[in-house]
Image (cartoon, grey):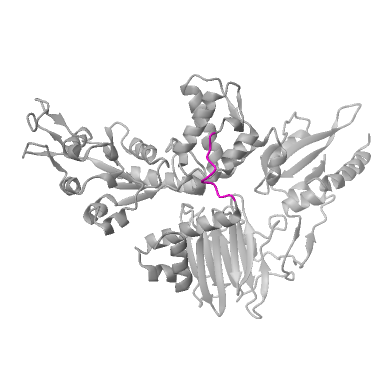
């Protein structure tokens, strides 16, 4: 079959593929695009719908420039300090990989810019810059959790999603005040990266409808970046055996499910073209057999490689705390920071979130050879606290050992003592614990001789200690002493993207521990677990997975083996919203130290609505 006939067939097939959400790109031996259907153009930004419009042009002196860049120097055309100087930004502290939000006037040294930057991406919450700048209401925002950058000019929002990184830019005409340029999908294809715009690269017009570039006969590399996928395509053109079948690859720094096929002459076997099949990642549900593997691969591509670098946490650190979500990575980052110092650390979080796991990880990263002593404070009788923590001498009380006994603090000398559920320590012992933390000295029961101890304290609680201080059940001075560095572990419902990794890790560990053959969960079982709210957090997940693995005799665990409750999971949108509203109300009151007027103002609620909600959710 001749190449032209092949191309005609591919064009016919590509139009059919448009209907089933597949993109097709066919490249000939000269590495030129001969076929690129609408789906492929839409996926990669060669064709897109622009909600607004602007004319073609070039940036000019006096134009107002707004930037929202989630990773300086990455997918922004190589933005550097010289580019920023065109906005009068002369700050040597801005480094590659930083989040940068800025607004300034192009090539005007007299007008000061407004900007902020954040190192290392270690914030799960959005980073925002809001300014009334030269009469324009400006807001630039990077939301790492939602993977969105947004630039708002006078209430008109220009959003741009990202997978790993993006440099979003909007230019306001300095003479007329209208939007002169806004960034949109496919900027790499159009050579309109942030840095290129600042360097005077002319930009194309965007209409209020669909925008498209004719790519037929044009070089592949004019529209697609050099990447491992591109390399494999070109190697396939040279006749090298290449296997890419339904695997996640990056095209212009965005992930897609890709397959490479070759077009060969029937008689000679000579390859005269390659066809790239592209499927959007949001079509994963359609791939029944590949679904679980692809989800895991996507999370590894999208989170593990980039976020390890963003958070500057060593690869081997905090392996026991499983998760790649923003909140999990932030928790690991704080744990790593805590491990590099000996100050006292307070870990907070709901029951079952993994506070003891994190405490052991902090100790292991900082002092792996030193002793680690774990104390479960709610398992000690009130009358035994003093002797258990500080030890006793022989004959100190009836039943005491004649040789005496070391307490937990003495056993932990030179290392770490982990006081789990510290909120359960009686007030009488809190006074003595405070003395130990201040003076590094203990007194054994029955002795007046001081014993020096060098112990780093990690405490954990599922209680609101600030509230306990207000109630008088926990000493304020002790709270300040243990709360030098706080790490709050999010509940599992707030990091559900980690569920798949946790389920697999727990199942693998369970099978290995009990000598069971390798098992995996069916799609319906995974669906049940991913939809559940997990009020008992990781501990509940461990119990459910272990029980299912033990009960199921086959290597596939179906949903019938899962013992997950239903009462804790919202059954309607109304119930879900009510639960979230109650949570926000409670957390705001805690943050405002119970000051209802302040909480009311922060939430922007009227007095009547505020008190109605308090009554509704039992928080009066």
Q: Picture quarter containing residue 250? A: top right
As rendered, which of 244 and 578 lies closer to the eye?
A: 578
Q: Picture quarter containing residue 140? A: bottom right
- Work out whether residue 230 can be spotted: no
- In reply to whether residue 565 is colored magenta, the answer given is yes
**Quadrant assignment for the C terminus:** bottom left
Q: Position of residue 595 (x, y in %)?
A: 35, 67
- In reply to whether residue 575 is colored magenta, the answer given is no
Residue in the image at 56% along x and 62% along y = 68
Residue in the image at 57% along x and 65% along y = 67
Q: Is residue 571 above or below residue 609?
A: above
Q: Position of residue 491 (x, y in %)?
A: 46, 47
Q: Position of residue 232 (x, y in %)?
A: 71, 36
**Quadrant assignment for the N terminus:** top right
As rendered, which of 495 and 231 lies closer to the eye?
A: 495
Highlighted magenta segment, given as a residue range: 563-571
How many marks are shown on the rendered structure? 0
- Work out whether residue 539 can be spotted: yes
Residue in the image at 50% along x and 28% along y = 547
Q: Is residue 388 left or right of 329 when viewed as pictured?
A: left
Q: Is residue 104 above or below residue 80?
A: below
Q: Please name the predominant secondary structure of the magenta segment in the image.
A: loop
């Amino acid at each position: 079959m001749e190449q032209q006939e092949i191309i005609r067939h591919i064009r016919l097939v590509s139009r059919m593929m448009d209907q089933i959400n597949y993109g097709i790109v066919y490249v000939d031996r000269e590495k030129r695009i001969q076929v690129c259907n609408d789906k492929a153009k839409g996926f990669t930004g060669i064709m897109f719908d622009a909600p607004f419009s602007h004319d073609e042009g070039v940036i000019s002196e006096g134009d107002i420039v707004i930037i929202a860049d989630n990773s300086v120097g990455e997918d922004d055309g190589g933005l550097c300090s010289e580019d920023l100087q065109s906005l009068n930004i002369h700050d040597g502290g801005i480094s590659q990989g930083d989040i940068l939000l800025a607004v300034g006037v192009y090539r005007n040294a007299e007008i000061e810019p407004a900007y902020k930057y954040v190192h290392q991406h270690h914030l799960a919450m959005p980073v925002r810059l809001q300014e009334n700048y030269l009469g324009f209401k400006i807001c630039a925002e990077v939301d790492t959790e939602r993977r969105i950058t947004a630039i708002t000019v006078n209430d008109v929002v220009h959003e741009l999603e990202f997978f790993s990184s993006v440099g979003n830019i909007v230019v306001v005409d300095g003479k007329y005040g209208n939007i002169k340029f806004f960034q949109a999908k496919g900027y790499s294809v159009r050579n309109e990266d942030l840095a290129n715009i600042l360097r005077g690269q002319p930009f194309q017009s965007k209409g209020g409808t669909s925008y498209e570039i004719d790519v037929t006969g044009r070089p592949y590399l004019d529209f697609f970046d050099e990447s491992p996928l591109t390399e494999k395509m070109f190697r396939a053109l040279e006749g090298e055996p290449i296997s890419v079948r339904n695997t996640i690859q990056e095209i212009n720094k965005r992930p897609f499910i890709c397959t490479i096929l070759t077009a060969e002459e029937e008689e000679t076997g000579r390859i005269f073209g390659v066809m790239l099949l592209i499927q959007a990642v949001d079509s994963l549900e359609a791939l029944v057999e590949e679904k679980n593997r692809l989800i895991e691969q996507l999370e590894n591509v999208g989170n593990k490689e980039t976020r390890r670098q963003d958070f500057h946490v060593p690869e081997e650190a905090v392996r026991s705390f499983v998760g790649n979500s923003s909140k999990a990575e932030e928790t690991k980052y704080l744990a790593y920071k805590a491990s590099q110092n000996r100050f006292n650390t307070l870990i907070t979080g709901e029951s079952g979130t993994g506070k003891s796991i994190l405490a052991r990880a902090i100790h292991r990263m900082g002092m792996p050879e030193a002793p680690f002593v774990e104390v479960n404070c709610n398992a000690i009788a009130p009358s035994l606290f003093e002797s258990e923590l500080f030890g006793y001498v022989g004959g100190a009380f009836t039943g005491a050992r004649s040789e005496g006994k070391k307490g937990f603090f003495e056993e932990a000398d030179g290392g770490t003592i982990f006081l789990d559920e510290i909120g359960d320590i009686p007030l009488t012992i809190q006074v003595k614990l405070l003395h130990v933390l201040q003076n590094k000295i203990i007194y054994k029961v029955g002795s007046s001789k001081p014993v020096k101890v060098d112990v780093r304290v990690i405490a954990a609680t599922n209680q609101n200690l600030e509230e306990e201080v207000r109630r008088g059940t926990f000493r304020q001075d002790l709270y300040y002493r243990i709360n030098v560095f706080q790490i709050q572990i999010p509940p599992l419902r707030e990091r559900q993207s980690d569920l798949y990794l946790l389920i697999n890790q727990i199942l693998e560990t369970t099978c290995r521990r009990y000598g069971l053959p390798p098992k995996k969960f069916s799609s319906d079982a995974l669906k049940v677990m991913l939809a559940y709210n997990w009020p008992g957090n990781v501990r509940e997940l461990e119990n459910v997975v272990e029980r299912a693995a033990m009960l199921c005799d086959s290597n596939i665990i179906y949903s019938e083996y899962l013992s997950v409750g239903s009462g804790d999971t919202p059954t309607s949108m109304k119930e879900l919203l009510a639960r979230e509203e109650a949570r926000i109300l409670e957390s705001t009151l805690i943050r405002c130290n119970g000051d209802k007027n302040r909480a009311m103002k922060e939430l922007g609620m009227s007095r009547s609505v505020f008190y109605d909600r308090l009554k509704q959710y039992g928080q009066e």
